[in-house]
Structure formats: C-alpha cells, structure tokens
Amino acid sequence: MTNDLLFIAVTLFLSSILDRRTVPYHRRTLNGLVLQNTVVTAVFSFFLLLSGNAPLSMVITIALHAALVAISNTKYKMLGEPLIFSDFLVLISVARHPRFYLTALSSLTCWLLSTVTPILIIFFIILNKRQAMPHIRGLFLLCVDLFVLFLLLKIPPFKNLALTPDLEEDSKSLGLLATLFLYWQRWWNSPDPLPLKADNIEKKDVSLGQKPEIILVIQCESFMDPAELPTLKNRPPLPTLKKAREHAWQSGKLHVNGFGAYTMRTEYGVLFGRDDTDLGFRQFDPFMTAKREITYALSARLQAYSYDTLFVHPHDMRFYNRDDIMPLAGFSRLIGLDYFSPPQKGQRYVDDVTLGQKLINFMDSCQKPTFIYTVTMENHGPWDADGEATPEGLLHSYVHHAENSDRMLGDLIDYFAKAKKSAILVFFGDHRPSIPTISVPCKDRHTPYVFLCFNEKGIIIRPNHHEEDMTPADLYRMIYQYSKAMPEGRSTTADQPQSTKEAFKAASDSVRAHL
C-alpha cells in the first residue's frame, strides 16, 4: 500500500504540471485543487484495479491527462471553449467519420495519439499482474476515492460550486478535470422539465385559409455573410441575403451558442424552443436528453394542427441520434442521404443548390399544409478538400460554398414567387465557420437569419423593414406563432409585385455572376 501511495503522490505532482498547460488557465482555487486531485486519484485507482501495477497506472493516468489537455487546448483555440463532458460522445462519431474531427488536431497530436495509445495497450497486457492483492488494493482505493467525491458534492462549499454553467470561469478556477467531473454531475442530476401541455386547438386555429400552406426552415451549415469577416470587409454582401433582409417580415442577428461547431445547440433551440437558461447544463448537447423533452418539439406541435412534417438532411442521420429522435419529435418522414444522388466529383457533400431543387420537388407534391425542416451540409468543413490547406485557401473554398447557399436561397424565393402558395421561409446559419487566423472565436458569434412570408399570390408580406436580434428559441416561438395564421402586414399592391419579383431575380442573377 505504501508503494501505491508513493506512485499516487508522483501522479498528482505530474498532473499538476500538466494542469498548468491547460487553457484557459488561472490560479486554481483550493476547492478546485481538492476536486482535481481526487479525480486524478480515482483514475489512478481505477487503472490499478484493472492492472494491479502502480507504475503502469501512473503512466496511463498521466498519458490520459496529457491527451485531454492537448485536445482541450486545440478545441479552445479553434472553437473558443474547453473540453466538456458531452464531447466524449463525439468518440462514436469519430469512428464513423474521422475526417470530421481529426483534421482539427495538429499532426503531432494525431501522431502521438496513434502511437502512444497502442503502446500503452500492449504494456497494459504485458505488465498486468496476475496476483489478486494489487487489484484488491486498487478496488479499495477506488471505493475510497468515489466515497470522497460523493461526500464532497454533498457538503459546502463543494455542493455550491458551478450551480449554473459558466464554462470559461469554472475551467479557470477549478481546472479541466474538476470541471469535466462537476459539469457531468450537474448534468446528470438536472431535472426534466414539466411536459408541455397539448395545445387547446379550436376550429379557427386549423382553418386552411389562415395558416400557411408551407413552412420551410433552412438551417444552413456554418453560414455567415463573408463580408462580415475582417479580411473581406470590402467585399459586397451576399446579394440574395441582402435583398431578403430588405424584404423580410423580420431579420437580424441570431445569437447562437457556439462557434465553429455544435450544430445541435442551434438546431435544438429552433426545434424545441428551450433557451440556454432553461437547459442549464443540458445546453452543451441538448440532444443527449431530447427524448425526455419531446413534448416541446415544434414538429410534434404542428402535427396537432394537421401539418405534414418532413426532416431533410443529406447526410448520415445517426449524427446526434437524429434517426431515433426526429420520428419521436413528430416528423412523419426523414429524408436522408439515400434520397440524393452521390455528390459530384470534387464535392464532399450534397451541394445546396441541388438540395434546394430537391426541396422544390417535395413542395410541388405537397397535398396538405407541410412543415419542412432542413439541415444543409455543403458548408461543412474540412474545406481543404477544395484546394490548399492554407488559411487563404480555406477562406476561398468557404466563400464559394457560402455563395452557393445564397444561390439556393434565391432559387427558393423565386419558387415561392411563382408557386402561388402561402408560405413562410426561414433561413439562418447554425454557427460561424472556424478558419485559422481569419474566422476565430470572438465575442461576436451571431449568424444571420431572415423570416420571409409569401401570400397565396406569391407576393411577399412585409411590414416596414424590421430588424430584431433573436435566439434560436425565439425563432421557434415566432415560427409557431405564425404557423396558426399568416401575419397581416403591408404587401406589394397589384402594380408592384412584378418589381419585387424582379428585385429578387436580379439578386439571384447577381449570385450566379459571382459564381
């Protein structure tokens, strides 16, 4: 036992050195140090239980800590936030789509992970002791550590730590490992919200003459106007987006939770209408608990108003368990990658223009009011597949894809102008792109959104130009509000609609000229 305690002491010393390499870093509080050291000791004890070898347990514990620090620091540099407990779920997706994630790590980090991991596994097998006593000591130490952690969470001041999420500050004061453990515990103990009561639907609420025939929501991957990037400030705005903002019922900044990633946070806000303050520690990956909040789903609520509901995503539906969650959330049909032709040569994903044409085909065949929620893929990285892997090359590729998204928006606007269907078109970006040295984490993380309304003549309904900043949950509430009755506002008169259509056509032509 004395030998085990000695190796625990060395492990804690080496761990403290690694902890100082973590970003963001600030002098740890005493409470943070106690939690951090207890977590490290518990990890050491776990590997001692498995291997019965104290030196090997020390090496594995330190190697694991070093890997977490390297990954967290890389994530902080690219996305502006450190590693969080919900990120471990990404390991499943890494196995399915490694290019999504491993390209974010440096070559050195990837090399170390790919070489050190198998070496540790080999040593673990070779040096695993067959005697029972070392394993029993590991079990005893692990039980003690877990009891201490359980006790700490029950007594002040530890039970009062991190009662509300503040990832940046908690990571500074508590440390990476303590924050991972504490946030996981807070998430685990988060209560489910009360089920949302079914809407009291009156006859007037479901009148076909009042509600839109089509509600089309486009969640555009990694979308922003490139003109907002500092290096492209002299570039003209995306033409269709600019014109759509001018004619929208409402437009503005969408304040999303995340930069460069975390599509599911924005998606969940728009589909389930729960703000970050409501979600608490569930905000980091709300899809992990989506099945326990299913009554809030916009699609389920719209089904009660006789809407047909489609979820369209030209990619692997297993991401975030969409294949399991979306049917439970009230989507009657899931339109995945199988419905699309393979991407053209040189393309990694289904392009947005092709996706837009597929949506038009779906809308042409609609026989009843329909809600379509679409998650695009074209703008998803890595963009080095399109050219050079330099920041300038990545930017050039990104701008090309963003222009295609703008072109898709123009095609959809043209369609509604000609289709003579009352409709709502919502278009927004889920988060900004992360491009080294060009688009980096900063205070401003908003993306654009436009909320367009078309009457049964294809004429845009609009008030005087109205801009308002919103959260994804605000957008949920707005969509739901107008799903029951189209807004009443100023529309173009009989001698004006052609000029409006021509304005949008000019915007679409301008997009094509840029391409």
Image (cartoon, rainbow, N blue to C red):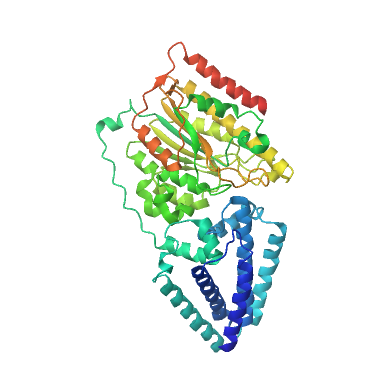
Place of residue 275 in the rendered image (x, y in percent of width and height, measured from the top left): 42, 47
> Residue 2, how many percent across, how many down?
57, 88
490 with respect to 113 (left or right) = left
Residue 484 x/y as whole percent: 33, 32
Looking at the picture, tell me which residue is in the foreground, 392 or 27.
27
- Residue placed at 54% from the left, 17% from the top? 502
Which residue is nearer to you in this view: 160 or 374? Answer: 160
User: Which quadrant: the N terminus?
Assistant: bottom right
Q: Is residue 396 left or right of residue 277?
A: right
Q: Is residue 403 visible?
A: yes
Where, by quadrant of the figure, is residue 385 drawn?
Answer: top right
Which quarter shows the C terminus? top right
Q: Is residue 64 above or below residue 480?
A: below
Is 313 on the left or on the right of 160, as rendered? right
Seen as rendered, the residue at the extreme top is 495
**Residue at x 66%, y 73% (from the top left corner):** 120
